[in-house]
Image (cartoon, grey):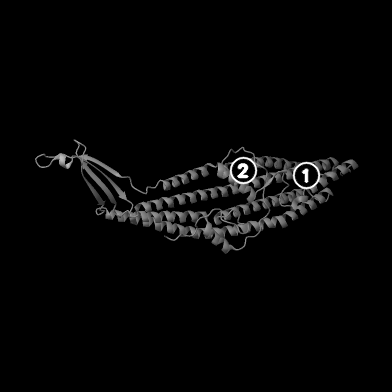
Amino acid sequence: MRTRVSSASAGLLAALLCVAVSADAPAASHHAVPSEGAAVVGPALLDRYAEALRAHHPAVAAVAARTEAAELALAGTRRFADPTFRLGGGLFDERNMSAREEGNLGYGMEQKLPLLGKEQAARSSARAEAEAAATRAEVRFQGLRRSLARALHAAALAEETVRLGREDLAWLDTTVTAAEARYAGGTASQFELLRVQNERSKRANQLANDERRRDAARALVNHALGRDPLVPLPDLVLPPVAGELVGSDALVERAVRNAPDLRVLARERRVAEASVEVARRSQRPDIALGVEGRQFAGDGGFRNGTFTVSLSLPWFNRANYRRDLDRERAKLRAAEADHADAAVSVRNEVHHLLVETETARREALLYRDDVAPRSGQALAAAHAAWSGGKGMMNDVLEARRMRVEAKLMLARAVAAQQDMLSDLSFVCGVADITAPDVAPLSAGPAAMPAQP
């Protein structure tokens, strides 16, 4: 027969149980309570970090340097070919011609004229390359921005896991104290006490592991920003569950207009078109204007001058010019096919992301509105039964497991939804797909431009 608990012990036990049950009061809330100064991972935070990414990330610096090189190549395109200067001397047979009369020193200069469009085609090709380089640089930055958003979501999820672990550890600490008090009073078995102590030890170990994973996730955020992994970050909090996205057809059309991959392929098609024009105009002859003069070396006197117009004759290389043109046309067809294939892929990706986003939203709502509140109620009921001597510790621990799992699944679903929204924003070429009337991240053609 179990002994009665003293009045002091009973009062202590009741107080501890009240504290243990009250730890579940926010069970239906969205997240565990964050610390002061925590930052919600949303568009404002992402924009602030994206500016730091643009300023400091080495990958951004690399594509910026390539863009600068392409712009310098455009600025350095020759409008006129370099002139050719000639200098020579002549030998005369004095019996037939006189060096004094004809002049034995000759000189001249020849300048190719930009009349048949070769130089303009080369400049257009350089301009297309510069525009393509600028588009690739912006798309690279947007890809880094998406990676940064995913890293922030992962870090916020790791922060939430640690907060939930600490909350659960505090609950277990209180429950262990209550179990020890009941065991001392003879109303709980040693098995129940050892069981809850084991749960507390496992949670403490799990919390230590979660804290290390959180530190690793924060280091990945700094890596995504291109800075030292140990730079401090604020406590990150996942945003609330995002609303439902509507208008899938409109999102698909927006993606076709603004998708980064399609913008790059559109620019590459312009480069291919410019290369076709360069190859086509390379078959045209070169026209040059020249001037020649002769003078006598003895007294330096001028004897005669000649004006010339020269024309190259691309007879022997006509087949090679044709092959060059066919090669560039094949590259253009490949660029067009790549764009068509990418457009189909973009449409499929948008539909897939919409499905995954809605799936994550529904799961988050399920755990937020149904599973988490019921798990909290189950824990409260099991605690009340155990404290009244009518329940078992196994039921309490099982209810506690259900509560922790519900909160973790809610956080994971929210993080997954935010990842899908970030991917969808990237594919559609906008900063925040959930904002009304969002503008593209950067201007640039997404549809195939018409050939001029």
Secondary structure, mark 1, is helix
The image quadrant where one finds the N terminus is top right
Quadrant location of the C terminus in the rendered image: bottom left
User: For the view shown, which residue lies furthest in the right direction?
Assistant: 7
Amino acid type assigned to the residue bearing label 1 in the image: Glu
**Foreground mark, 2 or 1?**
2
In this view, the residue in front, 333 or 411, is 333
Labels 2 and 1 touching (C-beta < 8 A):
no
Inspect the image, locate mark 2, and give the three-letter code of the amino acid beneath it: Ala
Q: How far, Cα to Cα, is label 2 from label 1? A: 37 Å
Q: Which mark is residue 192?
A: 1
Name the side, left or right, on which 165 lies relative to 335. Answer: right
Q: Which residue is mark 2?
A: 217
Mark toward the start of the polypeptide (2 vs 1): 1
In the rendering, at what x and y percent does residue 70 appear?
A: 44, 47
Lateral position of residue 278 relative to residue 206, left or right: left
Q: Residues within 10 Å of mark 1 (few under 14, many from 20)?
A: some
The answer to whether residue 153 is seen in the rendering is no
Residue 112 at x, y = what percent? 30, 49
Q: Quadrant of residue 275?
A: bottom left
